[in-house]
Amino acid sequence: MKEILPDFPHLAEQIGEHRQAFDAFYRLLLQYNAAFNLTAITQEEEVFHKHFLDSLAGEGYLPQGARVAEVGSGAGFPSLPLAIVRKDLHFTLIESTKKKCAFLRTAAQELGLNVRVCEMRAEQAGREQGIREAFDAVIARAVAPLPVLAEYCLPLVRVGGEMLAWKGSEDETLLARRAVHVLGGGELHSLRYQLPQGYGERMLVFCKKQRPTPAKYPRGQGKERKDPIV
């Protein structure tokens, strides 16, 4: 896989080109945050770097016209910034918390985004007809350790598609190798990058889906977290 570091000056330009939408998103985030506990990061400069720019770090890895699912959408990072700048993508956001789903639907409607929101747990989605193995890419950011995340995400990825995880600075790929193999994934690749202005080190982790996920996965009933595949 050809690894290309995020071009943050270009990504900042993209945010500038869609300034009206990003400003509206920021206002909605502040408006709903007090009641819905969406994010601890609320200062504009921090949101710009840690949420907006970081969300766009994986933009170049999503194929044109891709069907993209996001697991554990929360406040909509990285999906909503990606949907703002990539109108060609089709997003399905999977989130189990009712209040967060309400925020995501409001944001998608007010910003005119190509997004549908599914109020369900990831392990339920992984067994749902029309959702299981239906996506070109499945993305997630700050949801769970990588072995757990693989069991949430890979059942949703079509064979030939890819899981793309936004992670912190700690490399979890060795720990997750067995899980991704069991779940039908290929080799894990990671890409480290630094957010501008000293906002920290991050990592993107990629995994191509090579084989169908065995029918027993995801296991459900919290087993993904309680007894991860390692």
Image: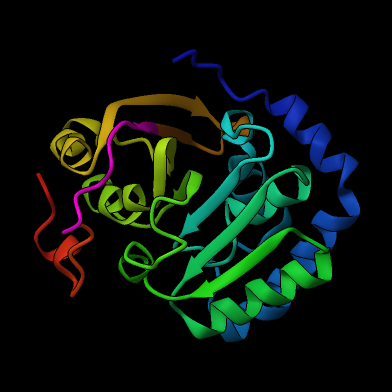
| Closest to the observer, 171 or 211 | 211
- In the image, is residue 175 above or below residue 4? below
User: Magenta residues?
Assistant: 206-216
Q: Position of residue 8 (x, y in %)?
A: 68, 28
How many dots with numbers? 0
Q: Position of residue 13 (x, y in %)?
A: 83, 32
Q: Residue at x 56, y 49 (%)?
A: 68
- In the image, is residue 115 above or below residue 32? above
Mark yes or no: residue 99 visible: yes
Q: Residue at x 69, y 70 (%)?
A: 29
| Closest to the observer, 60 or 127 | 127
Magenta stretch: residue 207 in it? Answer: yes
Q: Residue at x 75, y 43 (%)?
A: 88
Mark yes or no: residue 167 visible: no
Q: Position of residue 214 (x, y in %)?
A: 19, 49
Q: What secondary structure do most residues of the magenta stretch adopt?
A: loop
Locate residue 176: give its quadrant.
top left
Locate residue 110: give its quadrant.
bottom right
The quadrant of the picture occupied by the C terminus is top left
Task: Tell me: 183 left or right of 7.
Answer: left
| Closest to the observer, 149 or 145 | 149
Q: Residue at x 73, y 70 (%)?
A: 107
Q: Position of residue 194 (x, y in %)?
A: 52, 28
Magenta stretch: residue 20 in it? Answer: no
